Image (spheres, rainbow, N blue to C red):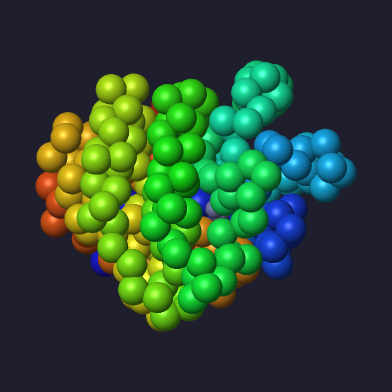
Amino acid sequence: MYLHLADQHLHTDNSPDGSHSAILMCERAVELGLRAIAFTDHCEAPEYYDGYYEKALPQAYFDAVKAKSVFQGRLLVLIGVELGGAVYEEELCRRLLSQYSYDIVLSSLHFVKGAKEYHLIDYRQVDYRPVLEEYFKELLRQAKQNLFDSLAHLDYPTRYIRMQGVACSLKPFADLIDEILKVLVQNGKALEINTSGLSACFHTTLPGYDVIKRFRDLGGELVTVGSDAHCTASLGGGLEEGIALAHKAGFSYVTMFQRREPVLLKIE
Ligand SMILES: [Zn+2]
Ligand SMILES: [Zn+2]
């Protein structure tokens, strides 16, 4: 078992798909002996004014603040957000990030504005290649926008493509992925190793080892590891495997973020 386990991607019942309160998630983290956890409830920027997120975002923030104070001395609680689709709402995102004192901001892209969410597409009917090409192009724009600390689940749509039993390769997108990784390197940002895929039928992290290794080879220094748990049962899931992959790819540290600054945790 590794000494420093810090789950950097977690959802509570302040996410539309989350099940448990911040307090229950903290209790589970203490049981598991984690050093730190980060609450990163969803904020889908393009849907912010539709009703849900405008209420949930402040609630998530204050619930995390409460949990942090309750668990002081037993567990380091980091307060974060998974900011989706920031590329479509730059001004709003800049305002939210100045309004709340987050420890960590994850960047994600769950859908291209105006198109279907990736988990709703039937990839047995729709060719995944143009879908992925558009995704990586938009993700590149969002990476360049630079409003985050760690880029979450870089190959997110492949989760749903593979879950539908459709084999998919990232090879045709190697240049685009390289461009994204280089932007992270240039801006000193982290790549997330999202371990949620380890318990799915395809059994790999998002992204997989090849992309993690490529990030390292391009000069990447920072990786965060997160279970992306939406309930207590999955909290911390796959963290050890995620850290082992980082180590194998040549990283000596994984990273957590405090007040938007990287804190390096030696892999030992
Ligand atoms: Zn996500
Ligand atoms: Zn998430």
Q: In the image, what residue occupies the spot 32% across and 28% down?
A: 183
Q: Quadrant of residue 255?
A: top left
The answer to whether residue 106 is left or right of residue 48 is left
Q: Quadrant of residue 11?
A: bottom right
The answer to whether residue 225 is left or right of residue 211 is right
The answer to whether residue 2 is left or right of residue 256 is left
| In the depicted structure, whether residue 169 falls above or below residue 146 | below
**In the rendering, at what x and y percent does residue 89 appear?**
66, 28
Say which of 89 and 245 sits in front. 89
**In the rendering, at what x and y percent does residue 27 appear?**
60, 63
Say which of 244 and 176 sits in front. 176
Q: In the image, what residue occupies the spot 56% across and 59% down?
A: 118
Say which of 116 and 80 sits in front. 116
Q: In the image, what residue occupies the spot 34% across and 63% down?
A: 205
Q: Quadrant of ligand 2?
A: bottom right
**In the rendering, at what x and y percent does residue 73 appear?**
53, 46
| In the depicted structure, whether residue 69 falls above or below residue 171 | above
| In the depicted structure, whether residue 58 falls above or below residue 206 | above
Q: Can residue 3 be seen in the rendering of this structure?
A: no
| In the depicted structure, whether residue 73 falls above or below residue 146 | below
Q: Quadrant of residue 7?
A: bottom left
Looking at the figure, which quarter contains the N terminus? Answer: bottom left
Q: In the image, what residue occupies the spot 48% across and 24% down?
A: 145
**In the rendering, at what x and y percent does residue 21 appear?**
72, 60
Q: How many marks?
A: 0
Q: Can residue 14 be seen in the rendering of this structure?
A: yes
